[in-house]
Amino acid sequence: MPNEINILLIDDHVIVREGLAVLLNQHGLGRIESAGSAEEAMTAIQRRPPEVVVLDISLGHQSGLDLLKNIHLAYPSIRVVVLSMHEEALYAERCLRAGAMGYIMKSVGHQLIIQCIRQVMEGKTFVSEAVRDRMWQQAVNRPKDVGAPPEERLTDRELEVYRLIGEGLSTQQIAGSLKVSAKTIQTYRNFIKEKLAIENATELVHRASLWAKGRHPA
């Protein structure tokens, strides 16, 4: 790949950014920059728009999904790869709808990550076979997999609130993070409880905490 291609790595963990930079440099994928927050990312993009962005959608208490949508709206030519720890059954299609061209789990091997980024750099999309099969089933109006996670019923914003609840944030803290009123967050909490058949706030916090840690309630 030509060295003049600019790649922006967006992840709130320094060690992840540094590790990815080393990996991409080893494969000569281009000139690498990095950002640790949505604000840093938009500043870097405005200064010098990259051809490719590699984005973690969990940016601490910020929404990487919102950042993805903002990048796609303002810079539709930028090709975005989402590299995430979150299960693809829940996030891959959301990210593709928001403008990403690739979605890959952090748990896969380095070679598959490089394959994904190369493919997106060539203007092609990249998702796992499981995601492709699921999207095909939906395209031909077949029923969704009965084993789909219940969180799939949540909207993008409800899922973000659910994630932040799971990370231990209060209603006020979530409101501040998402720049909305506490009343709005309480409305989201009510919607989440209804969709997930959760009876009270204590159960909501417990379920969200287990989900955020990659575990599932019995």
Image (cartoon, rainbow, N blue to C red):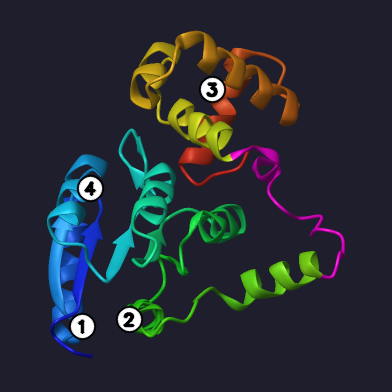
Residue that numbered label 3 is attached to? 205
**Residue 22 horizontal side relative to residue 120, left or right:** left
Distance from the alpha carbon under mark 1 to that under mark 2 = 9 Å
State the residue at coordinates (43%, 49%).
69
The mark closer to the camera, 4 or 2, is 4
Report if residue 194 lies within the magenta region. Answer: no
Check contact, mark 1 vs mark 2: CB within 8 A. Answer: yes
State the residue at coordinates (38%, 85%).
122
The reply to whether residue 16 is in sight is yes
Check contact, mark 4 vs mark 3: CB within 8 A. Answer: no
Which mark, residue 29? 1
The mark closer to the camera, 3 or 2, is 2
Q: Earlier in the sequence, mark 4 or mark 2?
A: 4
What's under tag 2, amino acid-wise? Ile
Residue that numbered label 4 is attached to? 42
Number of other residues with Cα within 10 Å of mark 1, as a class: few under 14, some 14 to 19, many 20 or more: many
The answer to whether 199 is drawn above or below residue 3 in the figure is above
Please tell me whether mark 2 sits on a helix, a strand or a loop: helix
Distance from the alpha carbon under mark 3 to that under mark 2 = 37 Å
Which mark, residue 114? 2
Please tell me whether mark 1 sits on a helix, a strand or a loop: loop
What's under tag 3, amino acid-wise? Val
